[in-house]
Image (tube, helix red, strand yellow):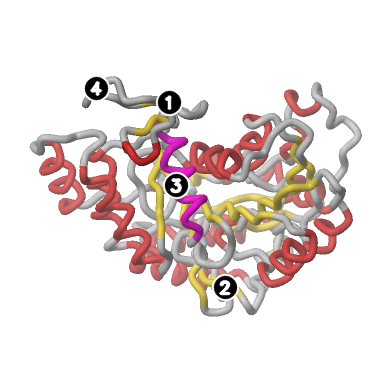
């Protein structure tokens, strides 16, 4: 049977050669390849600094550490995301607060953010769901008004733009993910971009145990030329030179990967616009999505039936996402009374259908035909 996943990485011969070459070098970890990837990514995005880490989750954790989130602090984020966007706050002892989404874009609502701000709020983590940028003008205006940090979760949004600016250039920090289903991959991996030098230094320190070998930063008396010291409680969130070699190779192709996704999304939009049994994703005019996901809403309570039918037809659909606070861990730890009406309604109907660089015209035709057939459910 034909199996068409909702997402798939694209590894080509030049990627394989880049990894092979990296394996022959003196350093396959903690070497110069990491800085090369960071510099290339910062240049692509258009920022001063980029810090590569072992995953997008590690990147989120590092951001919360960099702004000193601690017990008693609150960070507002969306329930319509993978758990990492909220878990990173818990890792630092803080409290995630969930603000409902806009029912059109499925992104966090600025108006709902404003409703949840208290004297304990320290930051906002907006998530660019499916690759569509959040309303960053309004979110950053709210942050400025209340003296809050903004950490953009752009795990879905490599290559996306907001009002002509690349995502990754707008706020205090932005994280990216290089998981295999994302636009580019390092197998696992993540990145933080920032223009703030102090945050940059904290991010770099945190990913390597908060250990420094820089004599200008030492707090203790040097006991020999081998001296190094741990100045905080960091983690081993380092990425390898081999992974970064793959990242550099993949980054060169990011624009064509995103362009192809936009072409696929355009065809879906054109050929399914009159399918009355589904709702297509709305795109806000100020954003230019990178289309990590293409989501439809299946009407009349028939999402589960549609999911099963498409799976049986060999189409690897998926559901993104159950509201984070609905997970058992959150339910057991103070979130039983949380309710985000729009996010919960969306979750009952949403379905992610295939979109990735190597999706063929014939495969897309097949997907469209199968979705047309859902009208008979």
Examine the residues drawn in magenta and state their main secondary structure. Answer: helix
Would you name the residue on which mark 1 appears? 230
Decide: few, some or many residues near mark 1? Use Cα within 10 Å; few <14, some 14-19, many ≥20. Answer: some
Q: Magenta segment range?
A: 196-208
Decide: few, some or many residues near mark 2? Use Cα within 10 Å; few <14, some 14-19, many ≥20. Answer: many
> Which numbered marker is on residue 201?
3
Would you name the residue on which mark 4 appears? 224
Would you name the residue on which mark 2 appears? 162
| Spot occupied by residue 124 in the image (x, y as percentages of width and height) | 70, 52
Image height of 210 relative to 77, above or below: above
| Spot occupied by residue 323 in the image (x, y as percentages of width and height) | 74, 41
Element class at badge 4: loop
Quarter occupied by residue 299: bottom right
Which mark is in front, 2 or 4?
Answer: 4
Looking at this view, is 164 or 64 the one in front?
A: 64
Give the CA separation, mark 4 to mark 1: 16 Å
Instruction: State if disc 3 and disc 4 touch (CB < 8 Å).
Output: no
Element class at badge 3: helix
Disc nearer the start of the sequence (2/4)? 2
Instruction: State if disc 3 and disc 2 touch (CB < 8 Å).
Output: no
Q: In this view of the protein, can residue 3 be seen by the observer?
A: no
Quarter occupied by residue 275: bottom right
Task: List the single residue furthest toward the front.
Answer: 221
Give the CA separation, mark 2 to mark 4: 51 Å
Residue at image location 59% in from the left, 64% down from the top: 132
Residue at image location 87% in from the left, 38% down from the top: 338
Which mark is in front, 2 or 3?
Answer: 3
Give the CA separation, mark 4 to mark 3: 25 Å
């Amino acid at each position: 049977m034909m199996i068409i996943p909702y997402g798939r990485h694209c590894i080509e011969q030049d990627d394989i050669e880049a990894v092979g070459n990296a394996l022959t070098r003196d350093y396959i970890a903690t070497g110069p390849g990491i800085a090369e990837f960071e510099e290339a990514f910062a240049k692509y995005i258009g920022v001063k600094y980029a810090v590569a880490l072992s995953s997008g989750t590690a990147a989120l954790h590092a951001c919360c550490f960099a702004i000193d989130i601690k017990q008693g602090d609150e960070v507002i984020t969306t329930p319509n995301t993978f758990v990492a966007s909220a878990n990173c706050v818990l890792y630092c002892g803080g409290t995630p607060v969930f603000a409902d989404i806009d029912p059109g874009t499925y992104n966090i609502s600025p108006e709902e953010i404003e409703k949840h701000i208290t004297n304990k709020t320290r930051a906002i983590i907006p998530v660019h769901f499916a690759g569509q940028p959040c309303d960053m003008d309004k979110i950053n205006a709210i942050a400025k008004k209340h003296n809050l940090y903004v950490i953009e979760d752009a795990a879905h949004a490599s290559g996306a733009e907001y009002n002509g600016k690349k995502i990754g250039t707008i706020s205090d920090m932005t994280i990216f993910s290089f998981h295999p289903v994302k636009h580019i991959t390092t197998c696992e991996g993540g990145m933080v971009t920032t223009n703030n030098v102090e945050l940059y230094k904290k991010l770099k320190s945190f990913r390597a145990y908060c250990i420094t070998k820089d004599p200008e930063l030492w707090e203790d008396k040097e006991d020999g030329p081998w001296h190094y010291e741990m100045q905080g409680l960091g983690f081993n969130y380092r990425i390898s030179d081999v992974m970064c070699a793959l990242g550099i190779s993949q980054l060169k192709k990011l624009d064509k990967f995103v362009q192809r996704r936009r072409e696929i999304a355009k065809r879906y939009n054109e050929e399914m616009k009159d399918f009355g049994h589904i709702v297509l994703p709305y795109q806000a005019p100020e954003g230019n999505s990178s289309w990590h996901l293409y989501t439809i809403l299946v009407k009349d309570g028939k999402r589960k039936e549609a999911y099963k039918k498409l799976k049986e037809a060999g189409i690897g659909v998926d559901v993104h996402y159950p509201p984070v606070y609905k997970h058992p861990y959150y339910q057991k730890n103070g979130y039983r009374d949380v309710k985000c009406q729009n996010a919960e309604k969306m979750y009952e109907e949403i379905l992610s259908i295939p979109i990735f660089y190597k999706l063929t015209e014939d495969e897309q035709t097949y997907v469209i035909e199968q979705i047309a057939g859902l009208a008979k459910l």
